[in-house]
Image (cartoon, rainbow, N blue to C red):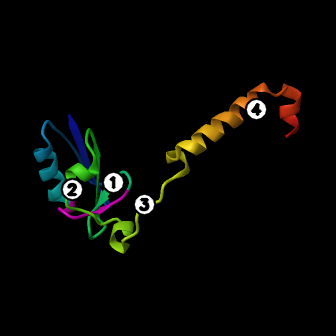
Amino acid sequence: MIIVRYTSIDRYSQTRRFKTLKGAQAFAHKYVGPHPTLGTYYAVSDDGVGRVTVSGCSLQALFPTSDCTPASILGIKPVMRDRDDPSIGKELAAQAREYRTMPRNFRDQE
């Protein structure tokens, strides 16, 4: 089940449920167009009036040809975040194990 919600700046909102991606795409494209500006969790129409949020599928699935993120426009490749680096995760886990082995009164002094 795909749930698409449209909201506008004048507080109009409409929520629809779809069984197919094609129906959800048609609804979303009707309100914000086929090439909106994509945020992390929403798509905004080019005029800035309407916003679409979705659950049950990704925004990229609703707008497959929309690559209007600032990074893509400027040709910037995504930077790997610290949490994506497995070596940093291992380092943090080791620090957490060391911290848990410290006596409680020593931990409070840090």
The chief SS type of the magenta part is loop
Query: How many discs mark residues in the rendered view?
Result: 4
Alpha carbon separation for disc pair 4 and 1 = 40 Å
Alpha carbon separation for disc pair 2 and 1 = 11 Å
Q: Quick one: which residue is furthest to the bottom in this view? A: 74
Specify which label sits upstream in the sequence, 4 or 1. Answer: 1
Specify which label sits upstream in the sequence, 2 or 4. Answer: 2
Residue at horizontal 11 percent and vertical 45 percent from the top: 23
Alpha carbon separation for disc pair 3 and 2 = 20 Å
Quarter of the image for residue 107 reads top right
Residue at horizontal 33 percent and vertical 72 percent from the top: 73
Question: What residue type is disc 1 on?
Answer: Tyr
The reply to whether the C-beta atoms of the residues labelled 2 and 4 are less than 8 Å apart is no
Specify which label sits upstream in the sequence, 3 or 4. Answer: 3
- Picture layout, residue 15 above or below residue 80: above
For label 1, the SS is loop
* Rendered location of residue 90, percent (x, y): 60, 38
Question: What residue type is disc 3 on?
Answer: Pro
Specify which label sits upstream in the sequence, 2 or 1. Answer: 1
Task: Report the magenta residues as a range.
Answer: 32-39
Alpha carbon separation for disc pair 1 and 3 = 19 Å
Residue matched to label 3: 78
Q: Quadrant of the C terminus?
A: top right
Question: What residue type is disc 2 on?
Answer: Phe
Residue matched to label 1: 42
Residue matched to label 2: 63
Quarter of the image for residue 19 reads top left
